[in-house]
Structure formats: C-alpha cells, structure tokens
Image (cartoon, grey):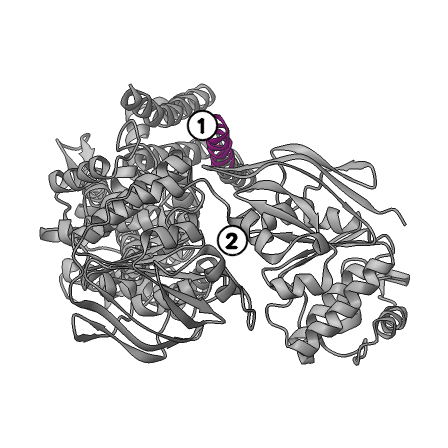
Amino acid sequence: MKDKKRKLQISGNALVLVIAIVLIVAIFSSINKNFFSYANLINVLVSSVSIGLTAIGMTFLIMIGGVDLSAGAVAAMSGVFIAWALQATSIHWTVLALVTLAGAAVTGLLNALMVIRLRIVPFIATLASQFVWQGAAYLICKGTPIPVKDAGLQAFAKGRIFGNNGIPWIVIMALVFFLIFSYVLTKTKFGRSVFAIGGNGEAARLAGINSNRVKVICYVMTSAFAGLAGIILSGRMNAGNPAANESLQFDAIIAANLAGVSMEGGVGSIPAVILGVCLVQAFNSGLNMAQISPYWQFVARGMLLLASLSIDFFRQRARERKLLADSMRNL
Amino acid sequence: MGNVIEFKNITKYFPGVKALDNISFTAKGGEVLALMGENGAGKSTLLKVLNGDYQQTSGEYLVNGEACRFSSPREAVAAGIGVIYQERQIMLELTVGENVFLGRLPTGFLGKIKMNEVHEKTQRIIDEFGLNMRSTDKVKDLSIAYQQMVEIMKAYGRDNLKMIAFDEPTASLSDAEIESLFRIIRKLKEEGKVVIYVSHRMAEIRQIADRAAIFKDGCYMGDFPLDEITDAQMIQKMVGRELGDVFSTLDREKEIGDVVLEVRNAQSPYLKDASFSVRAGEVVGFSGLVGAGRTETMRAITGADPMTGGEVRLEGRLLRCKTPHDAIKNGIVMVPEDRKLQGIVPRLSVGKNISVGSLDALAGFLGIIDEKRERKIAEDGKRDFNIKTPDLDKAIVELSGGNQQKAIVARWLGTKPKVLILDEPTKGIDVGAKSEFYNMICEFAKQGIAIILISSELPEVIGLSDRILVMRGRRIVGEISAEEATEGSLLAMAMMEEYGYEG
C-alpha cells in the first residue's frame, strides 16, 4: 500500500511537469501556429540537447550541494576552440573534439580545486571561472565567430536517423547519456555517494565516503558535458561563436530545479530532468516564436527561475510540516 | 521589584523527539534560579524557547504577566530577555561599546553613529560593573572572561532587561574570573532581574543560586530552595529512574578475550589525554558531562578529528586513521551522538541508510551496486534490529528516533566490525526501544565485539559496562568497575573537582 503511494508521488511530480509542458505548447501554439509543427518540435528537441547535456552534470552537482555557473562559458570556449583548431590545423575533428573535451574537463577540475582546497563557495568560485573562460573564448577568436566548415563535425551535429526528416542523432545521443547517468545515479556506489553527500555531508563522511573524490567527479563531469554541448553547437551553427551558450548554465539549473532536484541537495532523479529540460526549451523557443522582445525574454526567464525555486521551497516546507505532525501523533 | 516569568505547560516536539513535556514553573526576580538536570534533560531547549530560537509546540510563557511568543532571538532581546550562551555571540572586530549597543546604535544626521554617546554610556556600565576595560577596546583583545562580560553588558545595557539566563557560563573561566562573574550576577539579582543559571557544577550552584529547578528527560521535577536540599537528594532527583528491572534481566554472560583496541595518550585539538584499552567482548563505558571529551576521544581515534599525539593499536598492530574511512576499513565503527547531523541521511530510504556503510563491499565492476546483496543487508538489519518500518524504501526521517538509531546501528553491524563505538545510543528514544538496545549491546558483546559505550544516562553506563572510565576537562580522570560504580559516585567524579561525594 505504501509502495503505491510512493510511486504515485513520484509520478505526481512528473505529471505536473508534463501538464506544464502541454500548457506551454498549447499557449505558444495558439500564438504562433507554426509552434506545434513537426519541424519546430524537432527543432525544440535539437536546441534542448545543449541544455540537456549540461543539466545531467548540473543535476549531480546540485545534488551534492554544488553548482556550476561557468558551464555556459566553458561551452562557449570549447565551441570557439574547436572551430579555431579545425581552421588552424588539419587534424581530424574527432581528435580535436577529444582534446576539447579534455580541456573542458580540466576547467571542471579547477572549479573543484577552488571549492575543495580553497573552500570558496561554489557559486563564487564558478562565477570567477565563468569570467575567465568567457574572456578566453573571446580572446581565441578575437571577438568574431570562427566559421566551421568541417563536414565531419557538421554531420555529427546535424545528421538525422531515418532520412532528412528523421530524428537528429544528437537527440538520441543525449537520451543515451540520460539513460546511462540515470543508471549511474541509482545503481552505482558513486551515485549512492552523491545522494548521501547531498543529504548529509557529515554523515556521509563518517560513513566512510570519500566526499572530495565524488565532488571532483561531479565538477569534471559538468564541465565535460558543457564542453560537448559547445562542440555540438559549433557544428550545428557552422561557427564557433563566443556569444553562444550565454545562459546555458541557468537554463540547466532551471531545468534541474523544475525537475525536483532540490537546491538543498540530496534529492533528484535524472528522468525527471529530461522533462525539465523539455519544459525550459519549449518555454525559450516559444518566447522566441511569439516574437517577444529579447528584453522581456530575460524577465520571463527570471520569473521561471524564481517560480521553480519557490516551488522547491514550498515542497521542502510541506515535507517538514508533515514530518512534525507525524511525530506529534506518534509520540 | 516584580519581574516574573511564568512557564505554563510548555511542550516542544522535534521530529521524532519530545524535548519538553508540559513544563510549568515560575521564576521570580530577586533570586537566582538554577536549572539542573543531566545532559539532554531539556534545560537548553527551554532557554532556546524562551529567547525565540525555538517556538514551543504548545503552552505559553508570561513575562511580567504578559503572554509572549518570540519568533526570533531579536524579538526576545527587544522584550528584555537575555540569554548568555557558552559560545560567545559578539563581534570580535568591533569595540566593546559597539558590541554593547549592537542592533540599536544611536544615530544622528544621515545615519551617522553617535560614537561618543555609545562609548560614554558603555563606560558608565563598565564602571558600574567595576571592570578593568575601556569601551573603546576591541573585543578580540579582551580575555574570554571579559568577552563574556561584554555579552552580559549587551543584555544589561537595555533599560528594559527583565531576565537574564546563563548557559554554563563558567565552562571556560578561571576561579578569579568566576568570582567577578558572580559579583555581577548578584548585582543583577539585587536589581530585581530574573536570573536563570544553568550549570552542572554543584559547588558553583551552592555558591550563587537560591533555588534549583530540576529537569529529567524533558519533564519538570520540581524546584527546591537550595538550603533545604542536599546534593545527594538533588542528584537523586536528576537521575532517579525506574529502569532497574531492565538491567537486572539482561543476559550478560559472555567471555572476555584479548585486547582488541589499545589507545595510548591520544591527543587532538579537542582532547588533552586519553589512554585506555578494550578487550573482545568487553563493554567499556565512558561517563562524563557534555564537553568532557568523550566524543572527542572517539573522533580522534577514528580519524574524524586529526590526532595530534599518541597512538592507537588494533589487535596489537599500529593504526593511524586519517579519515573515518580508514577506521571503517579496519573494523572500527562509530554510531555518532547526533543522529540527525551525523548519522542519518534524512531523505534516503531506511534500506539505503543501512547499506551506505557497506558500499565498498557491495560495489563491483564499475562501482555497480549488487542490489540483491544490498537488499539482503537491509533486510537482515531490519530483522535483527527489529526496525519498525512498513517498508525499507520509506525515507528514514519518517521513522521514530529509536528506529532511526537502530538503522544506524544496523549500518555498522552490517560491516562486521571489531570495535563498535556507541555515542549516546539511547539519546532521545523511548523506554521500550531503550531496553531493546540494551539487549542488543549485550548480544554484540557476546559475539566478541569490543564495545565502547558513551552515555550520559548513568544507569545505562552502570548497567551495561564491565568497566567505566570517567572523563572531565578533556582527559580521562578515573576508572571504576561496574560493580563498584553508583550513579552518585560517577556524577561526583564527573562534576566536582574536589568534591568527596559519600554514597
């Protein structure tokens, strides 16, 4: 009986997300008929890949009580770097992609070092690196986007399964990553450690969990995913643009938060994040297609973040109240 | 002068715990009321309710006849309630005057602080208190005792101060400093303030307090004029418990084997000196007051705190634990004192809270957890420890305190330890669950596990241990066999420096 109740609760959260997505699609479809077309919905999915990949890392990171504000800048730098390297060298794009990913991973390692060794709060530490890598992105390309002509990278970023109107490969790749990391989070020692550290860091340490190692992996993972998002965007846009991916980290945080990944740490589920990502991208695309001015788009996204954080707060409070009421009944 | 604080049926729940149970009493101005009781009896919780840190679940308190309910310490301070905690709550970088007037600094044009006025007024209080400091001194340059005085002045500086409470104020003071503190307390008393004084030190209470209000397990045991009650009677009221039967029925037949754990002159930043040994199947009790260094000893041994001196031998082999992980790997496990902060991972399920101690053993290729074995560890734990939960997937925080604690013990027993350290294992759990724990502890000893039992519940230490070590001032100050130990003798060793307590 209790089992049933729990399952219902989980699907309750997912249900709310699905309803929200349906609502958003319905509203924007009524504003712009083209929104609910196959071509556009695929477009929304493609655009959500960057957010989705970053959100996987961000979910782990938020769960251990961290956050990464530098993800967008790392993505931008990675996109610009691979574009520059393709232009400057004749090395195969896959090798350059791996080098770029390794570089992105190093930025994650630096974030982890700042947080763990220098004990800087994650918010500030990654804010600092955001500035550095954003600056680096502009420096690499001297301020102007570098064109990407490499057919291989373009095919990777734009290719589709089942012909020209099929599903884009990168969407499938993102889904595979979601599956893998959902498994990692729920079925491995690493995933379990993430839950424990976020739920109660001191208890986790006293239970013999190597918190620092887990934290390092989470930071490195987030940056590597951001790097991958940057590479894909360069391929898709045919250019490494330092101004792209500007708010990637915020979209990823909103997506995770909407999916019930509590900023308090210790709570989260990867499948729900998929829905959160779809919601955020549908919202962003919808605003664009409704031709709402970019200035108002900023305001709207701010409100979305605020709304998701408020929901987090009320969820938390409802849980605490229920708990106290239970103890009063039982004692 | 008629300052009066009345407590009426104050009850306070925390998730899983009833910390205050229907407390009613009156504290009058012009006398010093000592709150007494064992660790966890509810004294500090009551002070925190009074100063707005906590809100009572039911009941009320009246300050000079007026019902009050403070939602923050700030409101309590504004209403004339001052609580002086052990940890000083002052700004070290500011001057004495700034601290005294913090939160209500007089300002003039454009919000400029009238510093002269601040220092003038503060200096007047300093002189009134007869202290050798200046209002313009920075607090960080003062001694600990004077820093505490600044805190008292901060409360005193408010014209409407009605009540001032001290929570173990002498813990870090020298004798001379205590004397000047008492002088101030007497002055406050003469001015008709309500003075509440929480302390474990019997001699001190005799010196300063007029009446003692005694707490036990969250209940109020009554108050007594100090000249009408002996120390022995007071201790009796603090510890008297109807648990005798529980201990006499325990099955304590077992074989005590070789020395498993040997600790020599262990030191840490929080521990001065501890040497002891524990044999297989032996239960060694650690008695002492909060802050005596019992937990700190264990934290140093297990690598939770850095060990700065001494050595630990496990089965004769030198062992140096840098992290708790090292200790666990070698078979030394600890059930921590603060279940909520250090034990449970609240939102994780009961099952996963149990298995988290065995993750190393459960993780195979690529760190993938063997879910069948994990399930088995959890189910064994639930069965062996009689954890009352409808299912193992329930979040642990939803269980009662006793069942949470059982799950934490199950976590560690699942790792097949050699040394089991239990730090206040029955704190905040109900009597039924307590006796289950007592049986379990005897059972573990029978299995040959070396057990260290830290407990502030004296009958528990006496009833379960083979030997008892007493700590005071961050060192081990005595050892006594369980047969010889009485509640009175243990409390006397722990509380009173030179106090010869007789039977």
Residue A61 visible within the image: no
Q: Which residue is mark 2?
A: B39
Magenta segment: A311-331
Dominant SS type (magenta): helix
* Residue B367 relative to residue A330: left or right: left
On screen, B476 above or below A208? Answer: below
Q: Secondary structure at mark 1?
A: helix
The chain ID associated with circle 1 is A
Q: Residue at x 86, y 54 (%)?
A: B192
On screen, B179 above or below B492? Answer: below
Q: Secondary structure at mark 2?
A: loop
* Residue B340 relative to residue B168: left or right: left
Residue B124 visible within the image: yes
Q: Quadrant of residue B21?
A: top right
Where's residue B121, x and y in %? Answer: 89, 68
Give yes or no for contact between labels 1 and 2 (Cβ–Cβ under 8 Å): no
Q: Residue at x 25, y 72 (%)?
A: B262
Q: Which sits in the foreground, A295 or B168?
A: B168
Where's residue A288, x and y in %? Answer: 45, 35
- Disc on res. A139: none
**In magenta stretch: residue A322:** yes
On screen, B318 above or below A236? Answer: below
Q: Residue at x 86, y 52 (%)?
A: B160
In the displayed orientation, state which residue is furthest to the front: B503
Q: Which sits in the foreground, B224 or B85?
A: B224
Amino acid type of the residue tagged 2 in the rendering: Asn
Q: Which sits in the foreground, B375 or A10?
A: B375
Amino acid type of the residue tagged 1 in the rendering: Asn
**In magenta stretch: residue A164:** no
Where's residue B33, x and y in %? Answer: 72, 53
The chain ID associated with circle 2 is B
Q: Which residue is mark 1?
A: A330
